[in-house]
Image (cartoon, rainbow, N blue to C red):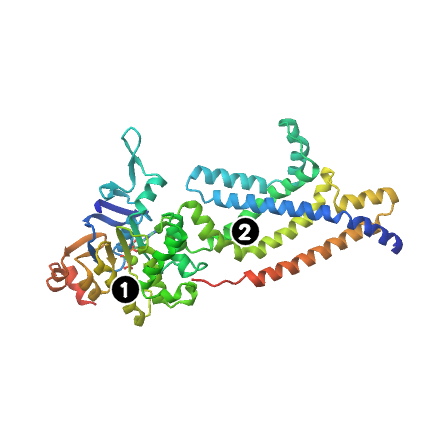
Amino acid sequence: MEYRGVTKSFGDLEVIKGIDLRLHAGEKLAFIGPSGSGKTTLGRMLMTLEQPTTGTLTIDNEPIWQMKDKRGNWKAANEAHLRSIREKVGMVFQHFNLFPHLTVERNVTLALTSVLNLSKEEAIGRAESMLEKVGLLDKLRNYPSQLSGGQKQRVAIARALVMRPKVVVFDEVTSALDPELVGEVLAVIKEIAKEGETAMMLITHEMDFAREVADRVIFGAEGLIVEEGTPEDIFERPQSERLRTFLSRL
Amino acid sequence: MWSWDYAMDVSVILLRALPAALLAAACGFVIASTVGLLIAALIRSRFASVRRVASSVAHFIRSTPLLVQLFFLYYSLPMLVPVSMTAFWTGAIGLGLHYSTYMSEVYRSGIDALPKGQWEAATALNLSKRRTWFSIVLPQAIPPVLPIMGNYLIVIFKETPTLSAITYVELLLRAKNEASVTYRVFEPFTIVGIIFIVCSLMMSLLVARLEKRWGRRPSA
Ligand SMILES: Nc1ncnc2c1ncn2[C@@H]1O[C@H](COP(=O)(O)OP(=O)(O)OP(=O)(O)O)[C@@H](O)[C@H]1O
Ligand SMILES: [Mg+2]
């Protein structure tokens, strides 16, 4: 997955001012930075929820927002192309966005049966083993309103990962949670990160978590990447003044 | 002036016309609900041209009187295209189309109330547009607006006398026919009014029960 010269403006406001970034298969990338620096926007672009204003975003060397027509000329991506891209990407949201009218089980199986066309039995099997991983097998029949925030977010994680995407965007998945519930969600993500295959884009304010899980940390501010490196580089030997100030304020 | 005997007789005659009125209202309501949903979906289309056409058609239908639309459907349309519909179907379709534009607003309020995150989660899960509408959006958007839809059923029912203008024999036209035979105008029209009051009252009780059952639902 690659961002090449990506910018994004909302009206007159340029939120992303030119990002070049590569994410390798299975890599765990943590994205840190002050509020409003464009972290969420960057993740949403990968999930096809926002379209870059300029630049290209590719997955497996395939542009997200462009496709070739029959004669081999580039044109704007259509819905079918975007759907083929979305097969490879998943996202966990800050506010969970579970479907409140569906049970936990249905939340997790819905896309398995209707997008991946799995049989009901297969889907339930896969959902159950995923829910077991996040420790919520006993909540299958519950509705989201009956769960705590931490449990909801774990369901949301299961819902995204059960589709086996190549990369998952975690957008500040603990910042809407009560402090005592943060741990259980981070533990689940760490566990899944250990298994390897899925690449992760971890947008977070939890520095200890970033340090522990990430292969690489990116510090961004005001729509630009200021510094990137291994967790040790970023947290032990920050180069820029911006990053030093940012870390000291935590 | 008021004869109880005649009132009784004419009540029986008028009540026989009630099913016709109810049926027209019910069909009109079903059409309004279906077409209204279609309009609501088209107004949210990805394509600007579709959105524009849908909302101008809706606007156009809403800003012309029902009576004019009924006359057009019943008398003018058959001159343009070789279809002729019975007064009943013209009435049901006319009512349905007219109120579909109001119904689309009702759906829209339900759909707009849905948090943006629900659409985004559906996109993130790669659900198709159709699946998103039928499994995520409508099941959450419709229950809260069912009572308002119920109120439109009452409104449509109260509008059925308009169909008398295209010769559909519902309550009012039946009463008028009676009056023209017996030259008694007091009892028939009074009783039509009473029948409407009673029916509307019963329907609103039903709607109130709907509201109790569906009005409040658990949220995320
Ligand atoms: N849809 C939108 N329309 C207009 N402005 C937007 C929109 N989405 C985001 N922005 C603006 O873009 C800027 C960057 O937002 P973004 O959410 O990407 O930042 P962030 O780094 O995730 O911040 P935080 O840490 O607070 O979540 C903000 O100033 C925000 O107000
Ligand atoms: Mg954010």
Which residue, given by chain and number where applicable, does mark 2 sit on?
A: B106
Using the image, tell me which numbered label, if any, was put on residue A188: 1
Viewer-nearest residue: B211 or A80: A80
**Circle 2 — which element?**
helix
Residue B67 visible in the displayed image: no
Q: Out of A101 and B159, give the one closest to the viewer.
A: A101
- Element type where label 1 sits in the image: helix
Residue B3: x and y in percent read: 89, 54
Task: Residue type at mark 2: give it.
Answer: Val
- Ligand 2 - quadrant of the structure image: bottom left
Q: Residue B69: percent from the left, percent from the top? A: 64, 38
Image vertical order of residue B35 relative to residue A97, above or below: above
Vertical comparison of B154 with B80: above or below: below
Can you give x and y, in whole percent of width and height, for residue A165 in the image? Answer: 28, 51
Label 1 – label 2 distance at C-alpha: 42 Å
Residue at image x 79%, y 53%?
Answer: B191
Residue B143 horizontal side relative to residue A106, left or right: right
Q: Where in the figure is residue B54, as x and y percent of width and height?
A: 50, 40
Decide: marks 1, 2 in contact (CB < 8 A)? no
